[in-house]
Amino acid sequence: MIRRSPSNVPVPPRRSALLLTIATLVAVAACSGDGASEGGASGTGDGGTGSNTAPPKFADDSFRIVHTADARWKGDVAQREMEAVLERFPQIDVIYAHNDAMARGAALACQQKGRTEMRILGVDGLPDEGRKWVEAGLLEATYTYPTCGDEAIKLALLACNGVDLPKRIQLGTRQWTKGSLASGGGPINSPGEFMFTNLCAQNGAALTTAPKEDVIFRIGMAQCTDDEPWRVQMGKDLKAAAAKFPQIEYVYRSANDDVETQRGIVRDFIAQNLNAILISPKESRALASACREAVDAGIKVIVIDRELGGDDGDFTTFIGGNNERIGAAAARQALAILGNGGGTIVELQGLMTSSPAQERHRGFRDELVREIEVIHRHKQRNK
Amino acid sequence: MRSPAPITRALAALGLVIGLGAIWNGDGAFFRPRLHLDLLGALGTVGLCAIGQCLVILGGGIDLSVGAVVALAGMTFAGLQLHTELPWPLAATIAVAVGAAAGLFSGTLVGRLRVQPFLATLAMMVIARGLARFLPELAGQAASSRFIPPGSRDPGFWTWLAGRVGPVPVAAIVLVTATVTVGVWLQRSVFGRHLLATGHNPEAARLAGVPTRRVLAATYVLSGVFAGLAGIVQVARNVQGNPSAGELLELQTIAAVVVGGVSLQGGRGNLWLAALGVLTLGLLEKVLALNGVPSHWRLVIQGFIILTAVLLQDRQR
């Protein structure tokens, strides 16, 4: 090793030990603070985003959510979280993950630890991902989160033809289990689905695939990011839907996860005087003003998946999935797996600052609370 | 060594974390040996990268590209395995070579062209991330999509690398072997001496006949090689090539090296310190996770720990 000049004056070790101790104390304080909040049972999980770490109070205490973790939509984070959960709990019955990537991460953690007792539920149900993993037996079930690609293009076409559209349409979901993969999944419809089907049926003329030659509608899509498989699928669905209609001239641009870029895309579309703009906003609020400009310029604005968050004058119509329904469907499946005897549940959450994660969480919790109340009453009566 | 302080300090930090784990032990989970073996396996990716990062930092540089190179090498490996049916030794070699090439690029910029390490590796970080996202297009998939084995048929090598020999995860064996090999080599070899001399005072080292430029370039190449290995481990453990893999890994490795007590100014420290740093941060994360501390608090706590380590270091000079 290199001999150093003695002019370097090292810190007395005591001082460093002191600083480390202080840091440790901070750590300890943070740990114990959280432990206290986790111990105290709180509300019924009826909505507040703040309740994400506090377990809900079920009527029947043989049902328990033993762990809730924010895995930020990421499979590798979920895998790491799940490893720690498996160390802590000898028996886990159901794992509910807010997306399939995290569900798969959890499944891998279980597999690598040699644990097989649990059933795992995911959300997204993409053909090349979730459904494949259900087929491979990694997941028990997954729920389609609709990309709305086909529907959005049709809505744009209807709007361009002057059809009056409802302000909000929420599509249902499909449950994919090993048994229902071949038959196209079990549909769990929502009112929005019927609304949309009726709309298309009543305005069949606008959705013709053999239009007059001189009719051209220019439609632009301002996507927030291409970075996730679900977004990629959405891009594919939009493109395929647009290709079905010769009267549509379709442009696709992605903002690479940057609000400013996405605003620029909307402004470009306005400058190009398109007939309709499709947008899946990166953040609510931040893009409302740009969309307002488009509406004022007479351009139809169809908002997909994420709400704009401004007022209803800022856009023409909104279409998206129904995350609360997905959460509720997963809750019913979880209870079907557990049966009346109860059991332990782990919830792996997406980024809790995003509305899909909050809604998937809320739908799941609320349905559990409701259904367990029913089970509890049923048990009491039979005593 | 003149003063035993750094290693003592690193051990003390690790001891503190172990103490914390013993007190808040997650209903006894902390005392199961299996947990610690598994942790070592889980640290495979970050630990391998930290080896390279430590070498670069000892030479007075910094490598911001490790995380992106992990993704690039991982995507290369996964893509080759899944889409060209290349046998794993060949795919792994190519993936490591890609890592080395990325390192050579940064190394040349730093060593030959005198670009600041921060900027050179920042550029490499962005380039490698972009390439990792582009690779799926070569396989006929949409850019930025992941390479995932179809159905339940995972490549055998992946399963092996993510599995165990007896109770010991294979990734842990890889990590420990690599750390010990490089650690000993660094202590015994001429290169090790040249590296410390260069990091300590490049001008003096050059005048003393050390080929400083080549030594510096070599550290980045080695960092790339280890990031490449880490990429393969990551692919096997997560059973997918993910173009977003390794995000923040550069910061985690720098943090681990610094927490271990290796001087960011270069020339002072050794690989053992960095390894202790990796263990300390990994174990801390595990203890916090075992106690159900939410991830946002974990970040805050880790931030304070890193800050403490840096404050200690600045006083050292």
Image (cartoon, grey):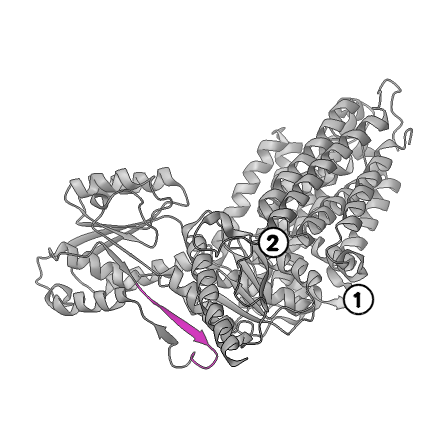
**x and y percentages locating residue A79 in the rendered image:** 61, 59
Q: Is residue A199 left or right of residue A126?
A: left
Q: Amino acid type of disc 1?
A: Pro
Residue at the far right in the pictured view:
B2
Task: Using the rendered view, name the quadrant where residue A185 is placed.
Answer: bottom left
Q: Chain of mark 1?
A: B
Disc 2 is placed on an element classified as helix
* Residue A135 located within the stretch drawn in magenta: no
Counting other residues with Cα less than 10 Å from the Cα at mark 1, is it few (<14), some (14-19), or many (20 or more)? few
Can you say whether A292 is above or below A48 in the image?
above
Give, as a single range, the part of the protein colored magenta. Answer: A171-180
Residue at which label 2 appears: B73
Q: Is residue A182 left or right of residue B289?
A: left
| C-alpha distance separating marks 1 and 2 | 28 Å
Q: Are marks 1 and 2 in contact (CB under 8 Å)?
A: no
Q: Toward the viewer: A68 or A150?
A: A68
Can you say whether A380 is above or below A262 in the image?
below
Q: Is residue B242 left or right of residue B302?
A: left
Q: Is residue A128 visible?
A: no
**x and y percentages locating residue A326 in the rendered image:** 41, 65
**x and y percentages locating residue A28 in the rendered image:** 71, 41
Q: Chain of mark 2?
A: B
Q: Toward the viewer: B58 or B259?
A: B259
Q: Toward the viewer: A118 or A286?
A: A118
